[in-house]
Amino acid sequence: MPAVTVKNRTRDRLIGDSVEIASSFCQRGRGLMFVSGLDEGAGLIIDPCSSIHTFWMRFPLDVLYMDRESRVVRADSKMKPWRIGPIFTGAKWVIELPPGTISATGTQAGDIIELER
């Protein structure tokens, strides 16, 4: 999967420097299931996506729900394994990140996120 750098343009903060993009049906379906953890700076973009689950996951996730304009619709910190996240009709894609990333970067709803290849 291709990887990108993810920045919070609103706060001028680096969110991740090795965030992979899951764009195929199989990549989106597998997501981070069965992965043992995420290194700092890593993550996964799932596009398209408006809701996630954490079945078969071994660690909590920080999740950013993004709209069409790359604006954060919702920021969920430390979503535990074996959960179903809410459906956000305004979300078009999500970014799954290591726990603590949202807090460390100050990212919140309304922030604009930028991807760099």
Image (spheres, helix red, strand yellow):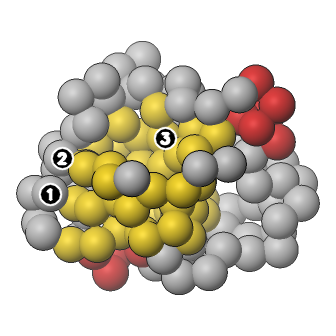
Q: What is the total number of numbered labels drawn onto the structure image?
A: 3
Q: Is residue 9 above or below residue 89?
A: below
Can residue 87 be seen in this snapshot?
A: no
CB under 8 Å between discs 2 and 1: yes
Q: Which residue is mark 3?
A: 94
User: What residue sits right under mark 2 in the picture?
Assistant: 112
At label 1, which amino acid type do we have? Answer: Arg
Q: Nearer the viewer, mark 3 or mark 1?
A: 1
Badge 1 crowding class, 10 Å Cα cut-off, few under 14, some 14 to 19, many 20 or more, is some
Foreground of the two, 16 or 107: 16
- Along the polypeptide, which appears first: circle 2 or circle 3? 3
Residue at (17, 50) in percent of width and height: 111
Left or right of 79? Residue 116 is left
Q: Determine whether, in the image, residue 71 is placed left or right of residue 58.
A: left
Pointer 1 residue:
9
Q: Quadrant of residue 61?
A: bottom right
**Percent x, y of residue 40:** 53, 82
The answer to whether mark 3 and mark 1 are in CB contact below 8 A is: no
The residue depicted at 34 percent of the width and 43 percent of the height is: 74
Residue 46's mark?
none
- Say which element carries label 2: loop
The amino acid on which the numbered mark 3 sits, given as a three-letter code, is: Val
x, y (%) of residue 77? Answer: 46, 64
Image side of residue 16 versus residue 81, left or right: left
- Location of residue 11 in the rendering, given as x and y in whole percent from the top left corner: 11, 66
* Above or below: residue 84 compared with residue 100: above
Q: What residue is drawn where x is 35% and y is 68%?
A: 15
Which amino acid is tagged 2?
Ile
Residue visible at 49% across and 41% down? 94
Contact between marks 2 and 3 (CB within 8 A): the answer is no
